[in-house]
Image (cartoon, rainbow, N blue to C red):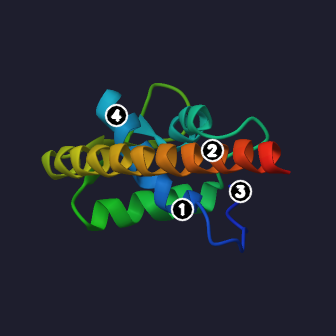
Amino acid sequence: MCFSSHCECPGFRIERFLQPCLLLCLAIRSSHGYELMERLKHFLLEDESPDPGLVYRTLRKMEEDGWVSSEWVTETSGPAKRIYTLTGEGKTVLRLWVEHVRRQVLRLQRFLEEYEKFQRESEHHG
């Protein structure tokens, strides 16, 4: 299975999984884009890193949809940073994503169980 944003296989697409990951990160605490990219690494495989363009496009889309809000914050030193915060609607969407992910995990577990059963039977008959 391929987890690359450039993958052509019909499997998992990281672009869709970014939404719930970003929502969860923002539910934990408001953050700026670079910090979010660092925190997203927790959800990826070791040899992956989030595509900054994809992360910022996803954040903009989620802001347009009303799931997050943002504001520019100027700290005492350094440039201003855009801080993203989860909205009430974003919390609702996160709960829906959690329900969806739980259903997908059950489907994937059933798939793997059937595959493993098939493998055992193939080895036994084989």
Q: What label does residue 1 carry, if any?
A: 3
Q: Which residue is mark 4?
A: 30
Asked if marks 2 and 3 touch (Cβ < 8 Å), the reply is no
* N-terminal-most mark, 2 or 4: 4
Q: List the single residue furthest toward the left.
A: 88
Q: Nearer the viewer, residue 17 or 115?
A: 115
Which corner quadrant of the image does residue 62 belong to? bottom left
Please name which of the two marks, 2 or 4, marks the residue nearer to the observer.
2
Relative image position of residue 43 (x, y in whole percent)? 56, 37
Q: List the single residue furthest toward the front.
A: 125
Please name which of the two marks, 2 or 3, marks the residue nearer to the observer.
2
Q: Residue at x 29, y 41 (%)?
A: 85
Measured in 3D between alpha carbons, the distance from the residue under mark 2 to the one under mark 1, in whole angstroms, is 32 Å
Q: Mark 3: which secondary structure?
A: loop
Q: Amino acid at mark 4?
A: Ser
Q: Which residue is mark 2?
A: 117
Relative image position of residue 96 (x, y in whole percent)? 23, 51
* N-terminal-most mark, 1 or 3: 3
Give the crowd class for mark 1: few <14, some 14-19, many >=20 residues within 10 Å. Answer: some
On screen, residue 17 versus residue 24, left or right, reads right
Please name which of the two marks, 2 or 1, marks the residue nearer to the observer.
2
Q: Amino acid at mark 3?
A: Met
Asked if marks 4 and 1 touch (Cβ < 8 Å), the reply is no
Give the crowd class for mark 2: few <14, some 14-19, many >=20 residues within 10 Å. Answer: few
